[in-house]
Image (cartoon, rainbow, N blue to C red):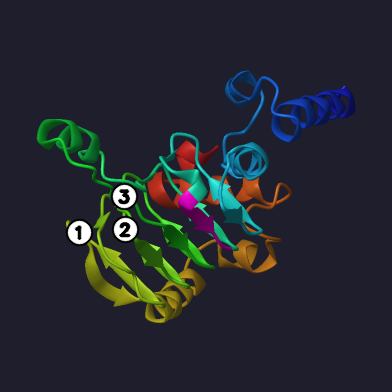
Amino acid sequence: MASIRSRIRAVLRTVAVERGIGFALYQRLVSNNDGRDHAEYLRRHGGLHSMGRDVMIVPGTTITDPAYTRIGNNVVLSKCALIGHDGSIGVLSRAYKRKLDRVGKIDIRDDVFIGFGAIVMPGVTIGPNAIVAAGAVVTRNVEPGTIVAGVPAREVGRVAELVDKLERESRDLPWWDLLARREGDIDPELEPELVRRRVAAFYGRGDAE
C-alpha cells in the first residue's frame, strides 16, 4: 500500500511541479510543504532569471519581480518578500504627470538563508554565505559571510563564528550521537528517535512515551 501511495504521489508531483498543472491543489493536499516542491515549481514556471541547486522556497514567499531575481545554490527563503520595484512609482507618475521608474535586481548568491518575514528591497545583492534574520528589512547589499538583522538591516555577526558556536553546542546535546549518524538535514530512519529524545529532554521522559 505504501508503495502504491508513493507511486501516486510521484505521478501527481510530475503533473503539478514539472508540468505546472494544478500546483496549488497539489501543494495543499499532497506536498509536504518543506519548500523543495515550491522551489522546483518556480524554477520551471516562475519566470526567475535563474535558480541554482538545493533551493527551498517556503510557500508564502513573495517574489514580485522574478525576471530581475537570481537565486544561487543552497538557498532557503522562509516566507520572506523579495521586492524588485518601488510600488509608489505608479502613484507618483500619475500625480505629477512624470515618466518615472525605480526597479532593481535582487541577487541572492550561494549559501544564503533569509528568515521569516524579512523584506529585501530592490537593487540588493546578498552573500554568498550570509544570513538575513527574521523580520529584517534589507535596503543595501549584505556582505559575504555576514549575519544581518533589524530595520534597516545591519551586520550583527559573522557566519563562520556562528557555525563554530553551533558545532560546539551541538556536540553537547543529548542526541548528538544521532546527529553524527544523520544523513542530510532529515534522515527518515533516525527522525522518530530524534524527536522522542528531544521531547524527553524538553519536557521529561514521561511526555516522551
Q: Are marks 3 and 1 in contact (CB under 8 Å)?
A: no
Q: Which is the main secondary structure of the residues drawn in magenta?
A: strand
Indicate the quadrant containing the N terminus: top left, top right, bottom left or bottom right.
top right
Image disc number at residue 133: 2
Q: Amino acid at mark 2?
A: Ala
| First-in-chain label (3 vs 1) | 3
Residue 60 among magenta residues: no
Indicate the quadrant containing the C terminus: top left, top right, bottom left or bottom right.
top right
Q: Nearer the viewer, residue 71 or 47?
A: 47
| First-in-chain label (3 vs 2) | 3
| First-in-chain label (1 vs 2) | 2
Q: Amino acid at mark 3?
A: Ala
Cα–Cα gap, marks 3 and 2:
7 Å
Residue 151, x across and y down, in percent: 17, 56
**Magenta highlight range:** 68-72
Q: Are marks 3 and 2 in contact (CB under 8 Å)?
A: yes
